[in-house]
Amino acid sequence: MSVNPQREVCDGFEVMIDEDIVELAQDGDDIAQEFLINKYKNFVRAKARSYFLIGADREDIIQEGMIGLYKAIRDFRCDKLSSFRAFAELCIT
């Protein structure tokens, strides 16, 4: 029986707060970044449902939201009195 080490790492992220995971991602941890993207993917999709752009496909709007999520991960500052989720929501919308 083989054990997937990436899965074990992701399981470790489950018990961490988002702000700590963001710090890891900002320090270059690709697995931390991937974990956050997967965690917030459905949040981005939910936000995208409330938008309509003439000539744009729904997937285009979701992609714009995902770009906002990447920027949120890149630009979030823990020293500001805001949760990552609140900051990400601003960046996504």
Image (cartoon, rainbow, N blue to C red):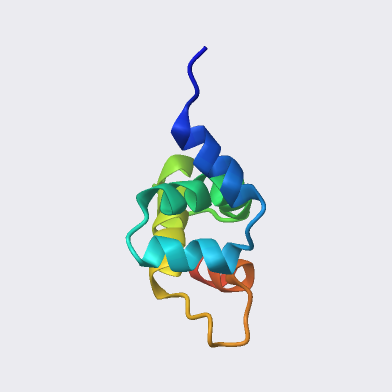
Q: What residue do we see at 41% from left, 61% from top?
A: 25
Q: How far across and how far down the image is residue 71, in percent?
A: 39, 66
Q: Is residue 50 above or below residue 6?
A: below
Q: Nearer the viewer, residue 74 or 30?
A: 30
Q: What residue do we see at 41% from left, 49% from top?
A: 63
Q: Residue furthest top?
A: 1
Q: How far across and how far down the image is residue 35, in percent?
A: 50, 47
Q: How far across and how far down the image is residue 58, in percent?
A: 48, 42
Q: Nearer the viewer, residue 11 or 73?
A: 11
Q: What residue do we see at 35% from left, 66% from top?
A: 27
| Residue 68 can be seen in this image | no
| Residue 85 can be seen in this image | yes
Q: Nearer the viewer, residue 72 or 77?
A: 77
Q: How far across and how far down the image is residue 44, in percent?
A: 56, 52
Q: Residue furthest front?
A: 1
Q: Is residue 17 left or right of residue 64?
A: right
Q: Which of the 4 quarters of the picture holds residue 70?
A: bottom left
Q: Nearer the viewer, residue 55 or 9?
A: 9
Q: Residue furthest right?
A: 15
Give the mark count: 0
